[in-house]
Amino acid sequence: MLVNSKLNKLLIGSLCCVAFSQNVFAGECNTKKLDDLFATMAARSALMEGVAAYKFINKQSVYDAPRELKVLQNTQDIAKKNKIDSGDLMVFAQIQMDQAKFIQDYWIARWNANTDNQPDPEVTPGIDSLRKQINALDDKIYTQLINNLSDIEICNQPTILKHLDKAFSNVKGIPQSPAYNQLTASAIANLSIPQ
């Protein structure tokens, strides 16, 4: 009887250790998936130089309210379809749009200050071509976000920010005050798996 009791305790203890070790390994942050997501986001942000060039040449405002409302409506639809809190996903989308405007403002200010290095209308892509690329990247970003929510929940915010900063290191015009990469990392960390 005493032997059976000790064996049961040993067996239970072993099962607990196996379960704990599986949870530790299952609970690791998958930074490869983060890097793929952030590379897609950085590619989207890099397109803003082209958008700024088009708007600079055509003397258009950086702010486009109807376009932003359309993006937010699309984001809300994506959230509902995937049973994600639409407010959290819309905060992420708004931060991305605000960052895009800052990047465009950066380039326009730079071209206004340096008339020798302005965009060439002959090689500047059209806005329809740019929006098509941006829409394709947005679709990919939302797919990556949704498919990786369980990994994102595991990752801590400093890890998210570190990898985000690395992916965006060559993107010019991202505000540092407030730190938009920090805002983006917070918005991503705030997303959660549908219940």
Image: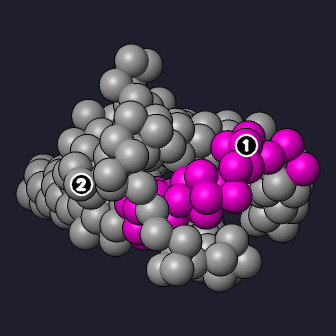
In the image, 117 versus 124, the foreground residue is: 117
Q: Residue at x 34, y 25 (%)?
A: 176
- Mark 2 residue crowding within 10 angstroms, few (<14) / some (14–19) / many (20+): few
Image quadrant for the N terminus?
bottom left
Q: Are marks 2 and 1 in contact (CB under 8 Å)?
A: no
Q: Residue at x 70, y 49 (%)?
A: 59
The type of residue carrying mark 1 is Ser
In the image, 69 versus 7, the foreground residue is: 69
Q: Secondary structure at mark 1?
A: loop
Instruction: Give the farthest residue toward the top.
Output: 177
Q: Quadrant of residue 156?
A: top left
The type of residue carrying mark 2 is Asn
Residue with the mark numbered 1: 61
Q: Secondary structure at mark 2?
A: loop
Point out which mark residue 170 bears: 2
**Measured from the top left, where is residue 70 in percent x and y?**
87, 56
Q: Quadrant of residue 24?
A: bottom left
Principal SS element in the magenta part? helix
Numbered range of the magenta stretch: 40-66
Q: Is residue 20 visible?
A: no
**Measured from the top left, where is residue 28 in percent x and y?**
25, 56
**Pointer 2 or 1: first along the chain:** 1
Q: Horizontal placement of 66 versus 85: left or right?
A: right
Judged by depth in the image, the label closer to the viewer, 2 or 1, is 1
Q: Horizontal placement of 5 versus 94: left or right?
A: left
Eyeballing the image, is 164 above or below 63? below
Eyeballing the image, is 130 above or below 116? below
Q: Is residue 46 magenta?
A: yes
Q: Residue at x 23, y 54 (%)?
A: 170
